[in-house]
Image (cartoon, rainbow, N blue to C red):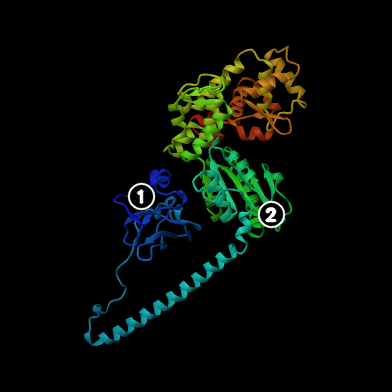
Amino acid sequence: MFNLRDTPCPYDNWVATARKSCNDPDRYHCLNDEFSRPGWICADPIWVEADWCPKYNTTTKKITEVKCYGSNCPTSIYLSSRSHLYEDCRSEVKTSTKFPFSSTQSPNNGSASVSIGVLLGLIFGILGLLLVTFSFIFYYRRKKKSKSESRDPEERKAMLDISESDNKTALGRSCRALRTERFVVITGIQGAGKTFLAERLYEKCIDCEKVWIRQLNQFPEEYDQHGRISYFLDDLFYELQSEEEVKEVKNKIDTLYERTVVKGNGQIILTITSLIWRRHESLFNERKYQNFIDLDQLCSEDREDILKFHMNLNNIVLGSKKSDDSPCSVVMKHKDYDRFSKESNQDFDSHVKIGIGIASSIALFCQYRNRYFVTERFSRTPLSFLHYYWKDVIEVNWTGATVILTLIAIQKEELDVNRVDQMCLTKIREMENIHNVEGFSSEELEELEKKRIIEKTDDDKYRFLVSTDKKVLLRMILQKHPELEEFCDPEMLRRRVYRPESLPGDIKGDYVKTFVFKK
């Protein structure tokens, strides 16, 4: 049912309104009808051509298209539910009730019959031309649709193991997006949970080969167009990346898409940081990139799932302890729970200024809540909290645990305690005047794991449980000991170190605290 509105569509509060209005927010539309009246409806989106806007036809009860006029019209094919992203599709639909010719305009009654004849001829000629044009468009779209559906849809569904009814959570929407297009983009600022969601999709993929790609040199040179392969493209884009580097990565992705999705039976899951996604919006205006999941706007169900997961992981109970709770458990107040679990109406700039996504904020809050008293300020400025915490750690007398964390922070990958760079270790001992640290005791590693600061991987290496800890600690270490830069991975330095003139303008607020300033 098309619900008329007395006010314009909620462009400033779109995500929250969509979730309240429709069970599946991806079906929410707010657009004009043929009488230029705004209204909303929950309906399956249609594909709209470039330079056209969707409108609702109250007679046919369907979403149709109308020509877009202006400088901010869509430049490529897109889903009708995304029309609010284009400014000229937000304006009123312009319809004309005037017919271009009228017999009453004839100044000569004697020529009325001639004018009427000419007019009728023009009318039938135009109608015939329109009929041919619409027939061609209908044929083209049917052909295009049949081509995209030529492969068995049941075969595509078999590659994912998830309930069909989950249409609201990020995981459920990602799976549905993969089933329809076999290509999905996961966007979000740092710490939004992009890699975590990709890993959950990795677990859900069944009966197919799974390939994880984090570097350009890991892209395949040869493509199996008949194989059922799921490609997970993670962390290929980063905030300090130049436009030329972004284009290079995108070209690799486009080639992989053409050869494994369009011409093959594969599927692609791609993660992109929101800053790159928005900074280079014109590069990602192709149809496949519009099939995206925005983790900067999580629904309450997602937030609660994340919160409960980390509460359980860190032995945290809500409200008060019960008789069957562990004596070591920590209590979380209801107001803290509500603050993290309720949906937020913050705009993107607010997310950037906070500098960290809600997923990592929750993980860090639970992690530190398990060890220390965490003030309410943490939920507002988590990176400032981390900044001061790690600064205190490296300013006091260093222990074996401090050395372990330093070595993990300055490496791009995980730390293998059996293959430590001895020159780096010697340098750290000299700078901090450490004489009692020769190796890494299992007790120290176990204690760091118990505190949920680091975790042990399947191949017996160690990494930070939350990557934001690593980024902030790296900043603190290189500010105190810039000499350690020579032991850092070059790729990591390219991603985390900046000079004043090279910092993009969209990195602001606390977001800057995860990068290393170099004079």
Asked whether residue 394 appears in the rendered view, the answer is yes
Q: Is residue 54 above or below residue 299?
A: below
**Residue 408 as seen in the image, left or right of residue 144:** right
Q: Is residue 485 above or below residue 397?
A: below
Q: Is residue 352 above or below residue 428?
A: below
Q: Is residue 100 above or below residue 475?
A: below
Q: How many dots with numbers? A: 2
Asked whether residue 505 appears in the rendered view, the answer is no
Badge 1 density bin: few <14, some 14–19, many ≥20, Cα 10 Å: some
Sequence-wise, the earlier of marks 1 and 2 is: 1
Which of the 4 quarters of the picture holds residue 110? bottom left
The residue wearing badge 2 is 228
Measuring from the top left, give residue 374's x and y in whole percent: 50, 21
Between 494 and 351, the one lying in front of the other is 351
Residue type (three-letter) at the residue carrying disc 2? Arg
Residue type (three-letter) at the residue carrying disc 1? Cys
Q: What's the CA distance linking mark 1 and mark 2? A: 42 Å
Measuring from the top left, give residue 79's x and y in whole percent: 48, 56
Measuring from the top left, give residue 289's x and y in whole percent: 55, 51
Q: Which mark is residue 9?
A: 1
Kind of element beneath mark 1: loop
Front: mark 1 or 2? 2
